[in-house]
C-alpha cells in the first residue's frame, strides 16, 4: 500500500539521501558531476526539444502540455523506467544542472514509488502536496550541489555570491539562497558539517580554485 504524502518536507531524511549519493559516487571535490550520476543510472533523460519533435509539437506547445518550463520527471510503470526531460532554450548550464539535480531528487526520494498519487505524474496532486514534494527535491538539489553546511566551512571571505556561484557552478540565485540558509540556520547546518569535512577534507584543506 502506498503512503500518504507528508504534511511537511522531511528535511533531515532528504539531506541524508543527498549525502548518500555523494558517498556512493565518491565525490570529493566540486562542482559535483551530475552527468556522471545520470550516466550510471537507468534513467532516460533528454531535452524538451527532443520530446517535442517526437510528438510533433512546437516547444511552446510542449511546455504548455507538460506544465513545467524547466524540466519534469515521470515514472512509466508499464516500462518500469524513469524519464527526465529538461528545457535548454534560454537556459544556462548552471540552471540546467540544478534542474537535473532537482528531478533526480524526485526519483532518489522515491516520490513516484512511495506515494499513491504520484505513480505517473504529479498533475493529480493538490497545490500543498506538490509543494511539499517540490521543496524536498529542491533541498536534495541544494545538499547535492551546494550545501549551506559546505558554504559555512569555507573561509568567510569566500562566502559571497560570485565566489559561491563559480565554485559550485550554480546560478547566482542559488548561491544567494545557500548563503542565506547558512546565515539564518547556522546552528542546524553546523550539525551537518562533519559529513562535508570528512567527504571533502582534501578539497577544503588542500586548497581549491573557483570554476
Image (cartoon, rainbow, N blue to C red):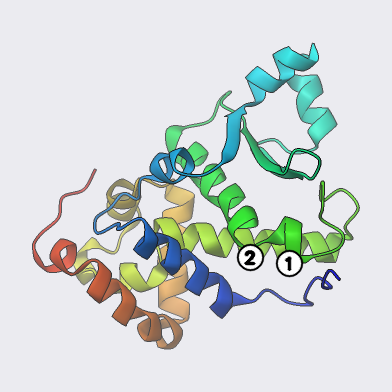
Q: Is residue 181 above or below residue 61?
A: below
> Residue beneath label 1, please?
132
Rounded to the nearest angstrom, the CA distance separating label 1 from label 2 is: 6 Å
Q: Residue at x 55, y 79 (%)?
A: 12
User: Would you call the spot at circle 2 few (<14 residues within 10 Å), some (14-19), or many (20 or more)?
Assistant: many
Total of numbered circles in the picture? 2
Q: Residue at x 39, y 42 (%)?
A: 36
Mark number for residue 62? none
> Residue beneath label 2, please?
136
Determine which quarter of the picture holds residue 67: top right
Determine which quarter of the picture holds residue 62: top right
Q: Residue at x 41, y 80 (%)?
A: 189
Q: Is residue 17 above or below residue 96?
A: below
Please identify the quadrant where the N terminus is shown.
bottom right
Image location (x, y in percent) of residue 154:
23, 68
Determine which quarter of the picture holds residue 75: top right
> Is residue 177 shown to the viewer in this render?
no
Image location (x, y in percent) of residue 208:
14, 55
Q: Residue at x 73, y 18 (%)?
A: 52
- Is residue 177 found left or right of 131 in the rendered image? left
Image location (x, y in percent) of residue 90:
56, 25
Query: Does dot 2 land on a helix, a strand or a loop?
Result: helix
User: Would you call the spot at circle 1 few (<14 residues within 10 Å), some (14-19), or many (20 or more)?
Assistant: some
Q: Is residue 78 above or below residue 17?
A: above
Dots 1 and 2: beta carbons under 8 Å?
Answer: yes
Furthest residue toward left: 206
Amino acid at each position: 500500500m502506498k503512503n500518504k504524502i507528508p504534511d511537511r518536507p522531511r528535511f533531515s531524511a532528504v539531506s541524508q539521501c543527498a549525502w548518500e549519493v555523494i558517498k556512493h559516487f565518491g565525490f570529493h571535490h566540486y562542482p559535483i558531476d551530475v552527468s556522471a550520476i545520470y550516466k550510471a543510472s537507468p534513467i532516460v533523460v533528454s531535452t524538451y526539444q527532443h520530446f517535442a519533435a517526437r510528438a510533433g509539437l512546437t516547444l511552446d506547445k510542449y511546455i504548455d502540455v507538460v506544465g513545467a518550463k524547466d524540466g519534469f520527471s515521470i515514472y512509466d510503470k508499464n516500462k518500469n523506467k524513469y524519464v527526465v526531460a529538461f528545457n535548454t532554450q534560454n537556459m544556462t548550464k548552471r540552471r540546467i544542472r540544478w534542474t537535473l539535480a532537482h528531478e533526480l531528487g524526485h526519483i532518489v526520494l522515491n516520490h513516484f514509488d512511495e506515494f499513491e498519487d504520484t505513480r505517473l505524474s504529479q498533475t493529480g496532486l493538490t497545490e500543498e502536496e506538490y509543494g511539499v514534494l517540490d521543496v524536498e527535491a529542491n533541498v536534495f538539489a541544494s545538499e547535492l550541489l551546494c550545501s549551506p553546511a559546505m558554504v559555512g566551512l569555507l573561509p568567510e571571505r569566500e562566502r559571497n555570491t560570485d565566489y559561491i556561484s563559480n565554485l559550485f557552478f550554480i546560478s547566482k540565485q542559488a548561491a544567494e539562497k545557500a548563503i542565506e540558509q547558512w546565515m539564518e540556520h547556522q546552528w542546524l547546518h553546523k550539525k551537518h558539517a562533519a559529513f562535508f569535512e570528512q567527504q571533502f577534507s582534501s578539497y577544503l584543506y588542500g586548497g581549491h580554485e573557483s570554476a
